[in-house]
Amino acid sequence: MQIGHNCDIGEHTLICGRVGIVGSTKIGRHCVFAGGAGVAGDNPITICDNVQVASVTTISRSIDTPGVYAGSVLHNTVQRWRRNAVRFAELDDIAKRLARLEKQRR
């Protein structure tokens, strides 16, 4: 486990092995970070109370809604990864638009 400088970790938060947390991160109470999870980003990241982060998940922006979070992306060049990360965030909307278009064609 590696916790960066100036982090604030709330009471009753569990941090398992191989977790890395970037400096100045603020983590709420009653959170769980499973093995291999991490917090990484340029700006200070804040994670609200009652958040569970699944194994090998990277949190790259603040979380303000309690719940379970998961996700990881295969490595690539930074430029390509950033471009694909933006597209991945829009994937659900794109799939819905495609379904509507296909329905109109029929």
Image (spheres, rainbow, N blue to C red):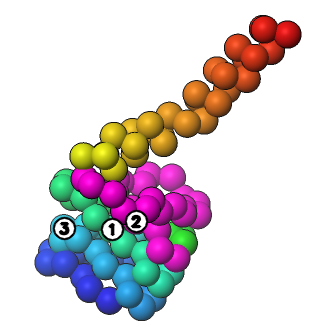
Q: Secondary structure at mark 1?
A: strand
Discs 1, 2 touching: Cβ within 8 Å: yes
Residue occupied by mark 2: 58
Q: Position of residue 4 (x, y in %)?
A: 19, 78
Q: Is residue 92 above or below residue 39?
A: above
Figure check: 104 above or below 97: above
> In percent of the image, x 31 and y 79: which residue is there?
20
> Around disc 1, counting alpha carbons within 10 Å, would you say few (fewer than 14), some (14 to 19), or many (20 or more)?
many
Tell me, yes or no, whether the two marked residues, 2 and 3, touch with CB atoms within 8 Å.
Answer: no
Sequence-earlier tag: 2 or 3: 3
Q: Looking at the image, is mark 1 or mark 2 earlier in the sequence?
A: 1
Q: Nearer the viewer, mark 3 or mark 1?
A: 1
- Residue 22 placement (x, y as % from top left): 23, 71
Relative image position of residue 78 (x, y in whole percent): 25, 53
Q: Is residue 80 visible?
A: yes
Please name the residue that numbered disc 3 is placed on.
Answer: 24
Residue that label 1 marks: 39
Q: Amino acid at mark 3?
A: Ser
Q: Please report the bounds of the magenta region as a residue range.
A: 55-78
Which amino acid does the dot numbered 1 rest on?
Val
